[in-house]
Image (spheres, coloured by chain):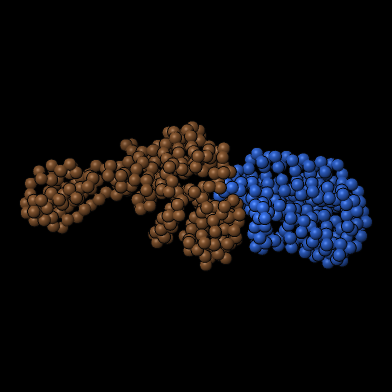
Amino acid sequence: MSVIEVEHLHKRYRDHVAVHDLSFTVERGEIFGILGPNGAGKTTTVEIVEGLRTPDGGTVRVLGLDPRRDGAELRQRVGVQLQESQLPERLKIREAMELYSSFYDRPADWHQLLEDLGLADKRNAKFGKLSGGQKQRLSIALALVGNPEIAVLDELTTGLDPQARRDTWELIEQIRDRGVTVVLVTHFMEEAERLADRVAVIDAGRLVAIDSPAGLVSRLDSGQRIRFRPTTPLEDRILTELPEVHSVQRSGSQMLVTGSGDLLQAVTSVLARHHIVAADLRMEQANLDDAFMALTTHEE
Amino acid sequence: MNRLAKLTFTELKLFLRDPTAVFFAVVFPPMLLGILGAIPAFREPSEDLGGQRVIDLYVPIMIGFVLAMLAVSVLPTYLATYREKGILRRLSTTPVPPSSLLLAQLAMGVGMAVVAVTLVLGVGVVVFDTAMPQQLLGYLVAFVLAAAAIFAVGLLVAAVAPSGKAASGIGSILFFPMMFLAGLYFPREVMPEVLRRIGDFTPLGAGVQALQDATAGAWPQPLHLAVLAVFAIAASLTAAKLFRWE
């Protein structure tokens, strides 16, 4: 079941088109990544979904609601973590949670939320005294305090150190496990690869691909590479006959096989059939990074 | 507690944690009145002032000081900072619109103004035997209009200032000439005619004069009430037109 439906979305600013004919759907309960280089139109897209901006064309339905017309209802059911949004320096965490939870008809238990986000012992700390990671976690807590069905998280881990980033990723998985649909805007490949069930790749305001991270990677030509040293000589033909194999190269005693799909399985089983042992077998797999570069690289 | 009341209460707590703002808006005006009153000559009736004492004149001036501090310095600095830090924007993603925070700030500012004005009047009446307002209704009308005018100017500053720092800068630039024309450095009674005339057309000059007239028992002059009303309406409409939430 789709909780977000975006069709033919169009948004132009004074002198440039920010979003062009963008369509996608987000299913209930998934982590949906929106990936793209800086300035690709990711934030504009989610801001239209949140009802913060008006599109110039196309339709957007969120939980069956029109974000502009049914804004009040929408804001009860969608939690938003904005890029670079702060709180007053002198506001205590406890006060922020109490205040923001009072805005909602059916708020979450904010004590529990702070507990889950590892902020319980900071409840009397003022916002100005928090570290970057703590501020981000508080920002997530505020996005969740209304007990939302959808949480939109924009550039959540930008500026966090690697450890804090990994902790945050675990949190997002926990959020999904509560049954919240997560829309995750990011320009970190690793983050999308690790978290997202499906990823929409946006470039220059257009949708270039939408698939699971693995699906995106497998679209790459020579997405996978296998290197090994055969213990007994073998003919290239044995391998090139396989549908998964694109090319076979030799350098000295080493063989390099490129291909896609279930390449490793195909190669190892054909070698086994010919009683050839593949020594020093290494698999080099393309990752989302490579897929992303291939999808968004423009010819200048 | 409803949402606006809760927001207002939170803003009040934040204000009370801001020692500089509390000092200058709430503590300093009655304190300055006390310091001026400690000078014996200021407690003597003066013929230059039509038989009034300097200390009598400074009660409405200090009330103007309170209003200017809260409305033109504190309010725009807070609101512009909230905009700069994305706090207004964050609110626009919740069921509470960011305009509620503006209303909460206004309510908090007006509430603190009432507290500080009461302190100023209290110090004046109890310590220096200054007069209670003789024309009470006129005094209340003058106070409400003066507060409306000066807070509207504050909202206009908040609307145009791109950042908290800019707002506090613009606030200071407005504060000193407005307070000067309201008589902070020398009361309007001893001002050259031309300065007093200019002051008549500023929110604080008109406000202080209207409060002083009502204290003495007269109904405030129509000119001063009109100036205050025009400022209140024009500045708030312009602010509403220019205000950006992000």
Q: Residue at x 59, y 58 (%)?
A: A98
Q: Residue at x 58, y 51 (%)?
A: A104
Residue A35 spot, x, y in % from top left: 39, 45
Q: Quadrant of the N terminus of chain A?
A: top left
Residue at the extreme left: A233
Residue A68 spot, x, y in % from top left: 55, 38
- Quadrant in the rendering for residue B130: bottom right
Query: Is residue A121 shown to the viewer in this render?
Result: yes
Residue B177 spot, x, y in % from top left: 73, 50
Q: Quadrant of the C terminus of chain A?
A: top left
Residue at the extreme top: A57
Query: Is residue B20 shown to the viewer in this render?
Result: no
Tell which of A29 and B122 is nearer to you.
Answer: A29
Determine whether, in the image, residue A90 is placed left or right of residue B215: left
Residue A132 spot, x, y in % from top left: 48, 59
- Quadrant in the rendering for residue B114: bottom right
Q: Residue at x 39, y 38 (%)?
A: A207
Q: Residue at x 15, y 50 (%)?
A: A269
Tell which of B233 and B6 is nearer to you.
Answer: B6
Q: Is residue A167 above or below residue A154?
A: below
Give the tally of numbered discs: 0
Tell which of B156 and A288 is nearer to you.
Answer: A288
In the figure, what tint was chain B given? Answer: blue
Tell which of B22 and A256 is nearer to you.
Answer: A256
Q: Which chain is brown?
A: A
Determine whether, in the image, residue A259 is placed left or right of residue A160: left
- Quadrant in the rendering for residue A40: top left
